[in-house]
Amino acid sequence: MYYNISFDIAAILVLLVIAVGMKTVLYTETRGHKLVRMYVYSVIACALIDIITAYTICYGYMVPDPVNLILNTLYQYSSVLCVALAMRTILNYYPSASKTSVMINRVILYVLTAFVTLNIFTGWMFRFTNGEYIHGKLYLIAYVLSLAVVLHMLFVVIKNHADQQSQISRIITLFLFLPTIFTVIQMIAGNILLITFGEAFSALIMLFALETPDYRKLMKTMKELEIAREEANIANNAKSDFLASMSHEIRTPINGILGMNAMILKDSDDPQIVEYAESVRVAGNSLLSIINDILDLTKIESGRMELVPADYDLFSVLSGCYRLNLMRANEKNLELIFENDPDMPALYHGDEVRIRQIINNLISNGIKYTKEGSVRLKAAFVENHWSKDDSPDENGKLMFSVTDTGIGIKEEDLDNLFTKFSRLEESRNRNVEGTGLGLHITQQLVGMMGGAIDVKSRYGEGSVFTVWIPQRVTGSEKMGDFATRMKEHVNIEKSGADNFKAPGKRVLVVDDVKTNIQVFKGLLRDTEMTIDSALSGAEGIELTKKTKYDIIFMDHLMPEMDGIEAFHMIRDDKENINCDTPVVVLTANAIVGMRTSYIAEGFTEYISKPIEQKELLAVTEKLLANAAGI
């Protein structure tokens, strides 16, 4: 039988190049590098012995049988050594591998070594008779034991994959499989020596993929980046949790301040006191606006800002924005003008809250930087012409244009206009209130909706901010003239507010802050409802067992038992007479997505603090109407 040794010769040449490179250009003192180097030397020795044994087998009639047996046994020992060094090299990358795993591999190697040794006396693997090489009955056992080592090392890699990045684990898996594949091919081909060729390729992969200095630096950098990313995620989650907590802690006292101040404005006839209270209201709302800006920025940067599309009436949005900004405009003797295309649609589908926020930010910005003259909003709807780029969920784009007669913006400053925390011409505008976040948040919100924002300005004359927001029209109604509808709406709203009475209805408010309860009762005082209160979740639960309520208002964050826990105890107790009563959560946690979270918990409605009387009355009236089947 004659063997083809070409692949063994090629393997030796490749390994010699690797060995020289590892001792010169690529030399390092790392443990992994030393192990790979030892593995390379062992494979070279194994390949040389393999070539020698190939010749002694081919010319067996010229070599005594005992010499042939010894030479082939040395080859088997060198193969076992290669497997052992490969195992140590791999384990170097997986420090978490258990002692049991290491011991199992050692036992298999010991058994393989013993089997090779016994073969000298038994011929179980191979023997020589009259110069002829003859396989023993158990010669496949050596291959099986070697394969067992490979499979067990593969198990170790999979089990301890967390020790290394996925790229390294894939490289090591390839390192394991290459010699195995070449061994199987050699078993099938018979006369072609391929095993050391596969081991040479494994050494090449291990060296250049894992043990070159540049690659190690890259892997170290990637590992550091992964750790930094995890730390950043932890820090970001901690920041979000902190903001949620601070939102609650800050909004709770503001709720009390603005709520009690609203009672003063409502009940006091003294002009001086009303003037003071109005100053408190303005300052409180400014503080609340700053808090909202910071929270919105955090939500956007953390990717937690979500759009919540729903059907809405555009007039309702514009009228709310008009009333919110009218007082500030009047304080500066500015004319606030809202204009629209009377024929534009009235009903749309989109995120009403964020559209309202965009409009308010633009108008507020105009008022802040305008000393005299006017701030004018124009609204229109531009229909799509149904190009291939248009979404079928959009009929066109809402266009809002806010024009002011303010100080204007220098052309060189336009590029920095939407940068967060920036304020142009700081010395000139040092008395202008705000965080410098409004326009940045506006730009981000418009972008999230797939819209665009544009600004044109003349320094010293004023600016024009224009946004286009894709929206879907949901009805055929026309909006009509805003100014005309606004006059009618104010009259209807006044009569409606005076007419909402609910004598005989009973509600329960649960809140651990007495001031909040006072504010709540004051806001609903004119409804003629009976209002009970509890200062803890446990106290509230006891009241629900004794009295049937039409609505329960539950604060979320309370000591000992929070609002969610108390809510579920009421809901889950089927003997509680209020187990099916509508429960509205009251919370100062204004982080985005919280409304959805509370509704998912089972709450009927959600009201954020500081509580606005209009929202509270609207929710109360709606729930009472639903209960009555109206």
Image (cartoon, rainbow, N blue to C red):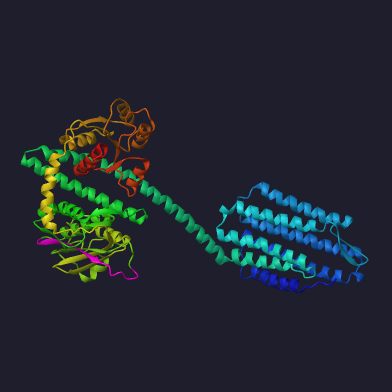
Q: Does residue 370 belong to the magenta stretch? A: no
* Residue 450 picture location, percent across and down: 31, 63
Taking depth in this image into account, of 458 and 84 the one nearest to the observer is 458
Q: Does residue 373 belong to the magenta stretch? A: yes
Task: Give left or right: position of 162 versus 455.
Answer: right
Task: Give left or right: position of 24 versus 525.
Answer: right
Q: Quarter-wise, where is residue 339 in the image?
A: bottom left
Count of marks, rendered view: 0
Establish if 11 lies above or below 242. below
| Residue 435 visible in the picture | no
Taking depth in this image into account, of 504 and 75 the one nearest to the observer is 504
Q: Give the range drawn in magenta.
A: 372-389
* Residue 387 picture location, percent across and down: 32, 71
Quadrant containing the C terminus in the rendered view: top left
Taking depth in this image into account, of 90 and 258 the one nearest to the observer is 258
Task: Give left or right: position of 157 versus 290.
Answer: right
* Residue 413 picture location, percent across and down: 23, 68
